[in-house]
Amino acid sequence: MSSSDGTSRRLARLALLLVAFVAAAAGALRWWRTHNIGPVERGWRVASRNGCLSCHGAAGQPEEPHPEGTGGAPAFRHDDVTEYARDRDEIREWILDGKPRRLREEEGDAPSPLLSMPAFRGVLSKQETDDLVAWIVAVSDFDEMPDAARGGYDLALGLGCFGCHGPGGRGDTPNPGSLKGYVPSWSGADYPELVKDEAELGEWIRDGSPRRLREHPVAAFFLHRQLVRMPAFGPGVTNDEVRQIGAYIRWLRREPPPPGVLSPKNRKRAQGHPERATGW
């Protein structure tokens, strides 16, 4: 074998190693940029690729009602979801079985409407189902909320925060040019790195970013590079309003309720019926 043949083989092996290294590095970067994307954003993606929005409408808000007598899909607004599902378990049953067992038993042999909910059992994985439930809960404001958190929610809603941060501040919506490629949710793993205390939350709201990140060269580069940027609301947002929004975020980051937690509407229905309030 000539020396030139040996050199060619070494170069070929080196090229293969380089390609493998680049592929591994790209995969690691892609994982790092996406692994903190939360269940609400993932659930929206599940809904998008499985036809949910074709019936329930964009963001779960159908544009036109279905003709009377044909059935049809309700909106994912709060009153609609709490009317059809008593708790998260029943939302899951709607997804997997097309209807909760409670309603199937009540209706018996009654004919189904022309348009009815398909059953996705065997189609969606457990993770996809969990994520879809999380998205429906978020977009419908399903969970019962204490008054202290409700005030902050209403303020954030009025400021338009959920347009970028997703339903209830729980989305990880795309943001080209940003460090992670998305606007981080308030409920996810990115939040503590970006907002270390209530003072920094105030800086985000009033100045559009905290001084700590503006003075960090890497953070500042991405703050200027990202397409979707946090607006600076200035002194029009008071210290008390910052505290109220902070209270909502702390409630949002609490431990999630157990799967069988009752919706606010059905918690009232269960009063006087202890057997209903213990779960389903």
Image (spheres, rainbow, N blue to C red):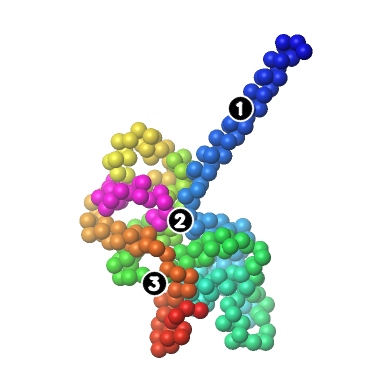
Q: Is residue 101 magenta?
A: no
Mark whose residue sits in front, 1 or 2:
1
* Cα gap from disc 1 to disc 2, whole angstroms: 37 Å
Circle 2 residues within 10 Å: few <14, some 14–19, many ≥20: many
Q: Residue furthest top?
A: 3
Q: Residue at x 58, y 31 (%)?
A: 22
Up/down of 196 relative to 102, above or below: above
Residue denoted by label 2: 171
Pick the front one: 197 or 161: 197
Dot 3 falls on a residue whose secondary structure is loop
The percent coordinates of residue 114 (x first, y second) are 67, 77
- The residue type indicated by label 2 comes to Gly
Mark 1 near mark 3, Cβ–Cβ under 8 Å?
no
Which residues are the magenta region?
Answer: 185-207
Q: What residue is at 42 percent from the left and 68 percent from the top?
A: 257
Answer yes or no: do the residues labelled 3 and 2 have beta carbons within 8 Å? Answer: no
Q: Residue furthest front?
A: 1
